[in-house]
Amino acid sequence: MVLFDQHIRRAITAIYLILYIQHTSAFRILSKRDNLNSGTSSTGCPFAKLGNQANSGIDTANDILGPIFSSVAEPLLTHGEQIRPEPGFYYQEPNITANPPDQRGVCPGLNLLANYGYLPRNGIVTLAQVLEATSRGFNMGTDLALVLAATTIFTSGNILTETFSIGGPDLRVGIGNVGGLDRHNTVECDISPNREDYYTGKCDNHHLSSRIFKQNVKCAEQQCGLFNLDAMTQQYSQNADYSKTNNPYLFYSIPSLLVSVGAHIFYSYLFSNGTYEFGGTPDYTSISNIVGAKLVTTNNDYDFEYVPERWPEINNSAGKPWYRRGIEFDFAAFLAIVPLVYAANPVFLNFAQIGTSNLTPQTIACDFYNTILQFTPAYYGQALEDSFNVTTWIIAKLDPVFSQTIFGCPAASFSNNGGNCPSNQNANKTNNSTCFAKTNQYYKVYFPTASK
Ligand code: HEM
């Protein structure tokens, strides 16, 4: 109980810190953006590994990724790190064409755990399974996993059975054709490390974006090939700039901030081979395998295909398997890092358009609408659909204003909020023609360039 109180106190302190950073001029002083964007290369990388020690899929691409491979240290295994996967857990490609399909979605961590059987391979998971799998597979703290998973169940899953789909809506969850981890503006949010915004991606918020991963690789190149916190802070800063400029319907609240900034942090702290900050290395081989980014070259150019997520079991850069971090990454440790990354490029909370040219009556109206939708549980979708033909009372009341007038928020600014009834066209927003690619497909390049 005492420990729990401490966590809560530290969490509250961190949230106050975020608000302080946002609302005082301090973030100009704290901002690392100018430094980061100036392209200052790191001074000399202490480690030297040959490019051909990289994973086999990309051996031929040393010219492109040279700096990434020439600098990676072997992890120092001093903190009881354990090899993953363990005996009994093995990689198996998800069957995304089955009927019903194996669900995969926005979270590479959960996708990977399902690909190895740490989570059910069909991607329909319970709260208890997620707590066990994230701890066992990655040593994520149970308190951090609980915050993420419980919020997901509330907004995008079934609160009675404590179940959710790690991808799109799925009848096996028992709440109709609604919800799923991909449900936008709930836990899933804008300014992701390597996915497009829901709006700029035309509803595709879940496939790895080649454009953004190329940018991420460049950030890592400046850090001796490591996807360390500096690289991921730079990545966050550039992603935030891109979204502020190109996404008039950018929506960013405290929950979005924690998940968006948090996801950038997870690259260094949870995908690192060994314990980050204690000799673990978030190197290209670990990161690219875990997030499913496979380099493909096309006439003088290159891109990243999205492939199923897996640990670098074979031929990793150190010629060794992947080691799970030895020290648990808990909620307090996580919250302590969030403000550092956010300070590099703060986004105005709830009105992300402030300070950009996208501030209009319509975008403010959509911010308001999205604030309501964010905590509208998908669970009610099915329960109310039968009698009311809508997800919730509030959506039914407000839809005429926000979906059908000059304030209308485009379909690609918020996702399926419930209901699947043919007589209510508005009920299933994601079937709108402005959206594409709702199901996961692998071995394809998504967003080689910016999609506007
Ligand atoms: C505990 C349950 C978890 C839930 C409910 C969850 C949920 C999510 C969601 C909703 C997103 C999309 C965020 C966005 O739109 O920016 C996401 C992304 C992400 N998650 Fe998870 N996650 C969980 C566990 C994990 C774990 C254990 C890891 C790492 C080992 C992880 C790593 C990531 C990363 C790196 C991204 C960003 C993907 C990208 O855009 O590149 N997550 N997660």
Image (spheres, rainbow, N blue to C red):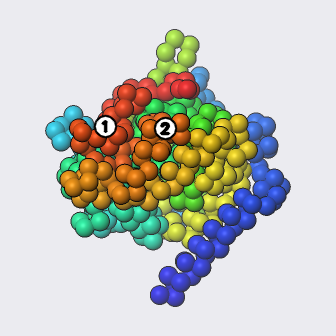
Q: Residue at x 49, y 15 (%)?
A: 298
Q: Element type at marker 2?
A: loop
The C terminus lies in which quarter of the figure? top right
> Front-most of 326 and 251?
251
Q: Name the amino acid type tagged 2.
A: Thr
> Front-most of 109 and 237?
237
Q: Would you say the beta carbon of the disc 2 residue lies within 8 angstroms of ligand 1?
A: no
Q: Position of 351 compared to 95: left or right? A: right
Q: Position of 54 compared to 46: left or right? A: left
Asked if one can make out residue 288 in the rendered structure from this viewpoint, the answer is no
- Residue 272 rendering spot, x and y as whole percentages: 52, 52
- Residue 9 rendering spot, x and y as whole percentages: 59, 79
State which quadrant residue 339 falls in.
bottom right
Whether pointer 1 and pointer 2 mark residues with C-beta atoms closer than 8 Å, the reply is no
Which residue carries the number 2 mark? 405
Q: Residue at x 69, y 58 (%)?
A: 340
10 Å crowding of disc 1: few (<14), some (14-19), many (20+): few
